[in-house]
Structures are given as C-alpha cells and as structure tokens.
C-alpha cells in the first residue's frame, strides 16, 4: 500500500515527520508532499504528483478555523465536503455570486454535487467528528464577510487548501481523506485567541494514529 501525506506547510506535519524517522521501513510506503499555502499552489502540486505516481490513499492534514463554537480549539475533524467560497463575482451589495449562480459551472458537473465536492468514502470514517468545509485564498477576519459566508454556505470550518485537494483527488480518481485540527474560531481577527501549537499537536496525534492503524511506515518525501 502506498500512501501520500499532503500538507500546506512543513510545520503542520513536523511532529509526524519526526515520528516517521523513528519507524522501520516496511509494510507500506509513505510519501509526503508540502504544497505551499492556498488553492493555486495546492492544485498545481497535487495534479503534478498524482499524474506521475499511483497512490492507494492520499491524506491531507492541516489546521483550520471553525465557525462552530461547539467544536473545541485543538479538536481534529474529518471533512465530508468542500466548497470553493471565493469563485464567482461580487454583487453590488458585497455578496458573492458563485460560479454556479452565474451559470459558468453546473452545480452537478463532476466533481461537484449541488455545488460541493464530496468525499465518497466520508461516511465510513466515524472515528472523528465530520464537518462541511469551505476553502478560500483569503482567511476571513471581518464580521461582514463572516456573516456572508455563514448565510451563503453554512460551513463548519474554513481552510485555504481543502477544496483544491478534494478537486484533484476526485478528478484523478484517488481515494482520499482530509483531516483538520481547529486552531481558531472564524471571528473578527484576533490572533491572540488562536492556539496553533495545540492544533498541530492534536493533528499529528491523529495522523500518527491513522498510520499506526494502517500499519504503514515511511519511505520517501516528495
């Protein structure tokens, strides 16, 4: 079994990389890919690596902001669906007309289902809380934009790479998982309220647990 671990930054999976160095090289092959931040970089690097390699499973691991105060900071969640939140046009009142609203993309045109990208295997992963995510090249920090996103998408969490990851995996027909640990709440920006170290610790604990269950060990780094 060959597994690819994907992250936007090395820092997000550094504890996992350090753990891998201590493991025997046997059973399964693990590659790692650091894409860089944002939808564009993620799309490029995911498309390139999936075009040149075959993987049995791809796992994206990262941190995220939560719109739900009932999801504790530090908790790791499993992403069921991804929506691109900034693809479209701004209307006169500041709202976003999505590419689906404008007729540029059909809401059920593959890999979309009703405007969202789904993970077909999502419902079988019951060991983590399941969430619906939006992705944007901008991390939102004003109440006006936050209220708009909640009204338009009713999301649970927000990241800057997840939708690109989902899109590439669905287009390339590769089994995948996305896990995210909550580093902050999506609210008027106040970084002193964030806890990135806790989120990274919990994210990597979960990732290591998944690899342990699979019985997979390190092989390479892309």
Image: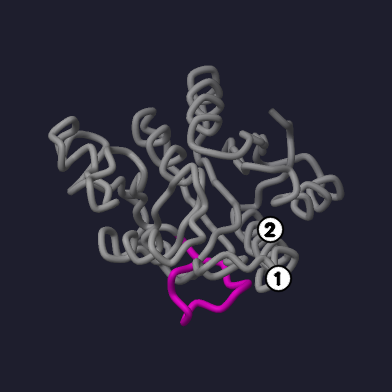
Residue 161 position, x and y percent, is 50, 43
* Residue appearing at x 51%, y 46% in the figure: 160
**In-image side of 106 versus 84 (left or right):** left
Q: How is the image coloured?
A: one colour
Residue 112 position, x and y percent, is 24, 41
Question: Residue 3 is drawn in which quadrant?
Answer: top right
Assign the N terminus to one quadrant of the image.
top right
**In-image side of 206 versus 162 (left or right):** right
The numbered mark, 2 or 1, whose residue comes first in the sequence reads 1
Classed neighbour count for the residue bearing mark 2: other residues with Cα under 10 Å, few (<14), some (14–19), many (≥20): some
| 199 magenta-colored | no
Q: Secondary structure at mark 1?
A: helix
Residue designated by label 2: 208
Highlighted range, magenta: 66-78
**In-image side of 184 versus 166 (left or right):** right
Q: Nearer the viewer, residue 117 or 169?
A: 117
* Residue appearing at x 48%, y 79% in the figure: 69
Residue 65 position, x and y percent, is 53, 63
């Amino acid at each position: 079994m060959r597994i690819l671990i994907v992250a936007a930054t090395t820092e997000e999976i550094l504890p996992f990389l350090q753990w891998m160095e201590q493991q025997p090289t046997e059973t399964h092959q693990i590659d790692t890919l650091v894409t860089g931040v944002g939808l564009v970089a993620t799309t490029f690097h995911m498309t390139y690596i999936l075009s040149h390699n075959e993987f049995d499973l791809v796992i994206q691991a990262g941190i995220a902001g939560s719109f739900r105060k009932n999801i504790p900071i530090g908790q790791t969640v499993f992403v069921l669906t991804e929506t691109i939140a900034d693809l479209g046009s701004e209307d006169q009142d500041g709202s976003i007309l999505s590419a689906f609203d404008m007729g540029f993309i059909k809401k059920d045109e593959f890999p979309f289902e009703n405007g969202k990208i789904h993970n077909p295997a999502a419902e079988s992963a019951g060991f983590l809380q399941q969430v619906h995510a939006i992705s944007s090249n901008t991390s939102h920090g004003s109440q006006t934009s936050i209220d708009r996103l909640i009204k338009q998408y009713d999301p649970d969490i927000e990241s800057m790479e997840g939708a690109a990851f989902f899109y590439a995996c669905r287009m390339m027909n590769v089994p995948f998982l996305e896990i995210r640990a909550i580093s902050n709440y999506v609210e008027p920006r106040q970084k002193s309220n964030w806890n990135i170290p806790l989120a990274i610790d919990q994210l990597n604990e979960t990732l290591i647990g998944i690899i342990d269950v699979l019985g997979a060990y390190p092989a390479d780094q892309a």
